[in-house]
Image (spheres, helix red, strand yellow):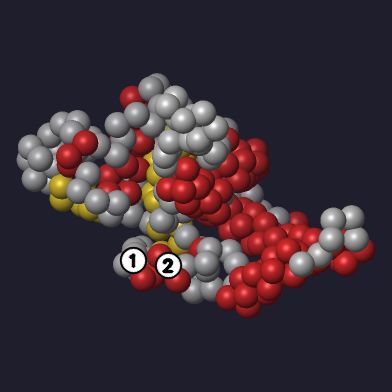
């Protein structure tokens, strides 16, 4: 199973399952239906922050600006801000744990991209202006800041950690591959041509050679899966063939075993 992580949808599998916070509360953390992705929907999406928490955090930021450094009032405001973000971190960790639980129980071989999340989310270095000492040139810091926030909010690294943690109990193999060109390659059994122009937008992939059209994140996940399978055979601790759905029953819990004994 290939898993593509993104800044609009947290994770997409090669068989078309979308994992995102927007699906939470509908019976799980995933859906076969693509979350609404219009510009207005993306602007209204607060991620793991509720509307009330976002408004409260903004008020706390304004209150913090009016406090004096080192004052007790400033410490209380900072503590209140930390409490809001603590709840956000817990929701993100819970989402990643549920997504990892589902993926590792369903599949014996999970392939993900080898992403340097820390490097991808670092701030842009200032660009001094050689003609005007003390001044700086435009370096795209504002756009990069938005991308950094999206990467960190979706919890890319947290999902990877959760997958490895859950795989210790399910026996699944977590395989990392080089992500180069996975979003620009027409997948098999189509033509397989690599062309950056095929990625028409964030959500649409249309091959410039064979005109194969599909949701762009699914295309990326399918190419990730193909790369993982081409890298070599991988067999899980339960003996599942690479890329297959789990055929053996999941490990029974103590409660399930007790119920089975009672029923017998």
Q: Position of residue 229 (x, y in %)?
A: 36, 29
Q: Does residue 225 show up?
A: yes
Q: Position of residue 161 (x, y in %)?
A: 62, 41
| Residue placed furthest toward the right | 72
Provide residue 55's location: percent of width, then percent of height: 62, 75
Q: Are marks 2 and 1 in contact (CB under 8 Å)?
A: yes
Residue found farthest to the top: 232
Q: Secondary structure at mark 2?
A: helix
Q: CA distance from mark 2 to mark 1?
A: 6 Å
Q: Is residue 81 left or right of residue 191?
A: right
Relative to 89, residue 218 above or below: above
Which residue position holds label 2?
43
Instruction: Find residue 171 and report its image quarter.
Output: top right
Residue at horizontal 38%, vertical 22%? 231
Q: How many marks do you count on the picture? A: 2
Residue at the far front: name it.
132
- The answer to whether residue 240 is seen in the rendering is no
Callout 1: helix, strand or loop? helix
Position of the N terminus by quadrant: top left
* Residue at 66% over, 62% down: 88
Q: Residue at x 33, y 25 (%)?
A: 230
Residue bearing mark 1: 39
Quadrant including the C terminus: bottom right
Identify the residue shown where x is 17% and y is 39%. Answer: 197
């Amino acid at each position: 199973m290939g898993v593509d992580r993104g800044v609009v949808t947290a994770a997409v599998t090669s068989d078309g399952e979308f994992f995102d916070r927007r699906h939470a509360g509908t019976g799980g953390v995933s859906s076969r239906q693509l979350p609404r992705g219009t510009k207005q929907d993306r602007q209204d999406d607060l991620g793991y922050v509720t509307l009330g928490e976002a408004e409260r955090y903004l008020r706390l930021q304004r209150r913090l600006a009016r406090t004096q450094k080192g004052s007790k009032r400033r410490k209380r405001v900072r503590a209140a801000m930390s409490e809001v973000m603590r709840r956000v971190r817990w929701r993100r960790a819970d989402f990643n744990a549920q997504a990892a639980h589902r993926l590792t129980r369903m599949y014996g071989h999970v392939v993900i991209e080898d992403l340097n999340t820390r490097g991808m989310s670092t701030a842009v270095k200032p660009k001094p202006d050689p003609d005007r000492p003390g001044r700086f040139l435009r370096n795209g810091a504002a756009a990069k800041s938005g991308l950094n926030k999206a990467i960190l909010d979706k919890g890319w690294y947290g999902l990877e950690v959760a997958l490895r943690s859950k795989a210790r109990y399910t026996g699944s193999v977590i395989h990392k591959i080089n992500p180069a060109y996975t979003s620009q390659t027409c997948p098999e059994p189509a033509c397989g041509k690599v062309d950056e122009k095929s990625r028409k937008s964030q959500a649409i992939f249309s091959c410039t050679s064979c005109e194969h059209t599909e949701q762009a994140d699914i295309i990326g996940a399918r190419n990730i899966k193909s790369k993982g399978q081409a890298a070599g055979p991988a067999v899980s601790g339960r003996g599942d063939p690479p890329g297959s759905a789990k055929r053996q029953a999941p490990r029974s819990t103590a409660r399930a075993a007790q119920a089975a004994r009672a029923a017998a």
